[in-house]
Amino acid sequence: MRKVILVFVLVLSAACSSSETQTVQLSCGQCQFGLTTQKGCDLAVKIDDKAYFVDGAHIDDFGDAHDKHTGFCEVIRTAEVSGEVIDDRFKVNTITLKD
């Protein structure tokens, strides 16, 4: 019986922790996506035409957010991300910039 419970718990844990990788737009929520619920500049993703602030990564983790050519406050970039939307925020597991 213990083995059955252990296997069940392991399978359930694996199912809950997995998240699908998807291609999204990634940028500053305030400067590029028009989000107004936070002040300052914060990283956001746009999925299916809806923007969400990101939890688990910072806007400056990918360089200067105000760089004219690559900064998230100046341009919208494409990225592959894994994570999930929880309470109207995107809880990110991984981010891989595509451009």
Image (cartoon, rainbow, N blue to C red):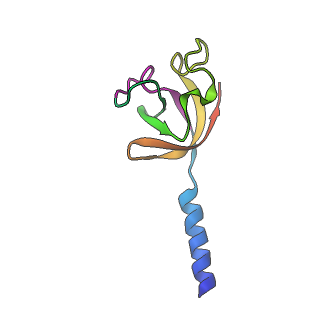
Image location of residue 2, percent across then percent down: 60, 85
Q: Which residue extends farthest left?
A: 37
Image location of residue 23, percent across then percent down: 57, 35
Above or below for 75 versus 83: above
Q: Which residue extends farthest front?
A: 40
Image location of residue 39, percent across then percent down: 38, 26
In the rendered image, residue 35 lying in the magenta stretch gets the answer yes
Above or below for 79 versus 88: above
Q: Which residue extends farthest top?
A: 68
Q: What is the quadrant of the C terminus in the image?
A: top right
Residue at 57% x, 65% y is 13
Residue at 63% x, 83% y is 3
Residue at 49% x, 37% y is 54
Q: What is the quadrant of the N terminus in the image?
A: bottom right
Boundaries of the magenta span: 23-36
Task: Count numbered badges in the picture.
Answer: 0
Above or below for 89 versus 45: below
